[in-house]
Image (tube, rainbow, N blue to C red):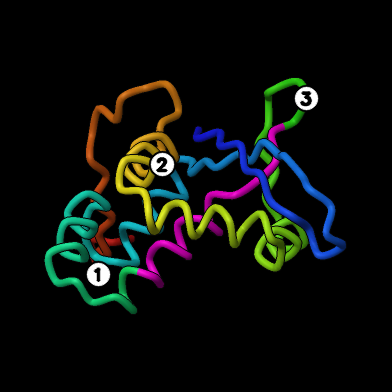
């Protein structure tokens, strides 16, 4: 989990300071890796080497919005839903986080390392495969 404190002015001009939380569970991480067809680390290396700004921005946005949520007070759950995501996506807090991650390589590295860390090292790399034919039953 990645906790990040942001300071920003909301749309009413009020100065705010807020703790934001970002996390990807193992199933979410596996879905993203299956979608991009490779591990996150390899994909990030390719994006930075290719320096295609649109692809890099799209990926950054996907990672921020996919991982944003609210931790329950008892710490048992991390709530994510469309309403929370939409509220965050259209806030000045999101704009601030996006700008910070885009302009601060060290912060982006910490975000990347922490967002999928659930306190346990991934022992196995899960590579989803589609099995077809009669043996798939």
Left or right of 33 on screen, residue 93: right
What secondary structure is marked by label 1? loop
Question: Which numbered mark, 2 or 3, is in the foreground of this view?
Answer: 2
| Quadrant the C terminus occupies | bottom left
Mark 2 vs 1, N-terminal side: 2
Image point (56%, 37%), residue name: 4
- Up-down: is 70 above or below 51? above
| Extreme-left residue of the structure | 49
Give the labeled residue for mark 3. Answer: 73
Mark 1 vs 3, N-terminal side: 3
Left or right of 104 on screen, residue 12: right
Q: Could you tell me what secondary structure mostly forms the magenta stretch?
A: helix
Along the line of sight, the residue nearer the viewer: 14 or 91 = 14
Residue 79 image point, x, y percent: 70, 43
Along the line of sight, the residue nearer the viewer: 80 or 3 = 3
Which circle marks residue 132 in the picture? 1
Residue 97 image point, x, y percent: 54, 53
Image point (69%, 58%), residue name: 88
Spatial CA distance of label 1 from label 3 is 44 Å
Question: Which numbered mark, 2 or 1, is in the foreground of this view?
Answer: 2
Which circle marks residue 111 in the picture? 2
Which circle marks residue 106 in the picture? none
- Up-down: is 51 above or below 64? below
**Tags 2 and 1 in contact by the CB under 8 Å rule?**
no
Give the residues drawn in magenta, as a range: 57-71
Image point (47%, 65%), residue name: 61
Instruction: Please tell me how crowded label 1 is: few (under 14), some (14-19), or many (20+) other residues with Cα within 10 Å.
Output: few
- Up-down: is 90 above or below 119? below
Image point (23%, 71%), residue name: 133
Question: Which numbered mark, 1 or 3, is in the foreground of this view?
Answer: 3
What secondary structure is marked by label 2? helix
Left or right of 110 on screen, residue 95: right
């Amino acid at each position: 989990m990645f906790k990040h404190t942001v300071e920003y002015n909301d749309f009413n001009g009020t100065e705010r300071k807020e703790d934001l939380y970002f996390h990807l569970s193992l199933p979410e991480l596996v879905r993203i890796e299956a979608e991009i067809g490779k591990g996150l680390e390899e994909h990030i290396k390719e994006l930075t080497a290719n320096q295609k700004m649109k692809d890099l921005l799209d990926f950054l946005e996907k990672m921020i919005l996919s991982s944003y949520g609210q931790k329950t007070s008892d710490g048992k759950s991390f709530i994510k839903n469309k309403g929370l995501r939409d509220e965050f996506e259209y806030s000045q807090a999101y704009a601030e986080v996006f700008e910070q991650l885009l302009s601060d390589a060290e912060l982006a590295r910490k975000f990347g390392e922490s967002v999928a860390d659930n306190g346990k090292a991934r022992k196995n790399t899960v590579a989803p495969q589609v099995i077809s034919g009669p043996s798939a039953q």
